[in-house]
Image: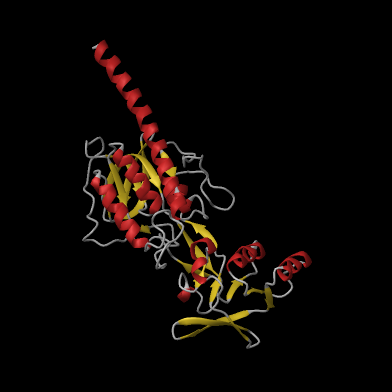
Amino acid sequence: MIVVRHGYPALDRPIPIRADKAALPRPKRTPPGDPASYDIAVIGGGAAGLSAALVLSRARRKVLVVDAGAPRNAPASHMHGYLSRDGLPPHELLAAGRDEVRRYGGEVVAGTVTELVPDGPTGFWVLLGDGQRIPSRRLLVTTGLHDELPDIPGLSDRWARDVLHCPYCHGHEVRDRRLGVIGGTPGAVRYAQVVRQWTHDLVYFTPPDLLTAAERSELVARAIGVREGTVEQLVIEDDQLVGVQLSDGCVVPRDALFVPPRFVPHTGLLADLGCELDDDGWVTTDATGRTSVPGIWAAGNVVDPRAQVITAAGAGSASAIALNADLVEEDVRDAVRDFHRDVAS
């Protein structure tokens, strides 16, 4: 399989956080209990992380975002389906998000997160690759996922150009063109039926003898062509996809391909902290992103593989509100404890 690394690399340890050093300063070292320590450290600077940081900064929380600068949709020239920002290049959305977070006092920095270490009942140390230790009362992990593509020569080179994943993100831009779907995985036939919404000229490529009679009937009923065989390579001319070559040498002319990848979440940091994962390796959370470990939330594609940019941003916002409420409860407990202690003395 080919691994396309967007957001965070396939290896969960360590997680490199890359960004423009001129734009993202290094965080300062702070000892535990120091007033400079953070209320919330956000690991990941995509839509989910920045959205959460914005809400929390506006709530007057001290927030640190550790930003990779390489979100999953970085190869895409434009993003779609985000109300009021349709067609905006992804990097421009994130640049605007970083500016908004900083406007309210939040910090966005570059670094390498090597480990997250518990410190008390709900506090944590964020360990960076350069030896810095950043204390934080709570954690929000938005480390995303990577897409694992079929091992077809030329496929990964065209990713987010004319080899696409999400028809809701890119279908309109290739509407009414000669499209293809690479099948052979669970759910791929249903996926092809969705892609059919955007074109009358669709071919479903599948290994031999995988289609059931019912699936074949459904494809034929909607005039979806079926080509059984092994896809040998993509045919590229003048830096554009022009066809799909099968192992028998036949080339099927196509203008764009949709490929359902295998989603692999970056849950290494969460797993090391003991957060519960499901049987497929995804972290389990409640509706607000709260994990099974007190003090840790998760949001975005690390939780939901199908979350689009706007969905991830909404999840980050929901997590931020829950995080602030959790901190308020702790603030109340601490205030009551200190009040009674002062009265007693």
The single residue placed furthest to the bottom in the displayed view is 249
The single residue placed furthest to the top in the displayed view is 344
Q: Which residue is at a point 21% across and 61% down the rendered structure image?
A: 22
Query: Residue 283 in the image: x percent, y percent?
Result: 51, 47
Classify the position of the N terminus by image quarter.
bottom right
Query: Residue 26 in the image: x percent, y percent?
Result: 23, 54
Q: Which residue is at a point 24% across and 15% down the rendered structure image?
A: 342
Picture quadrant of residue 222: bottom right
The single residue placed furthest to the right in the displayed view is 213
Please indicate, yes or no, whether residue 267 appears anywhere in the rendered image: no
Query: Residue 39 in the image: x percent, y percent?
Result: 31, 38
Q: How many marks?
A: 0
274 above or below 20? above
What color scheme is it?
secondary structure
Classify the position of the C terminus by image quarter.
top left
| Depth order, front residue of 103/85 | 85
46 above or below 291? below
Picture quadrant of residue 12: bottom left
Query: Residue 242 in the image: x percent, y percent?
Result: 53, 83
Please indicate, yes or no, whether residue 11 appears anywhere in the rendered image: yes
Picture quadrant of residue 34: top left
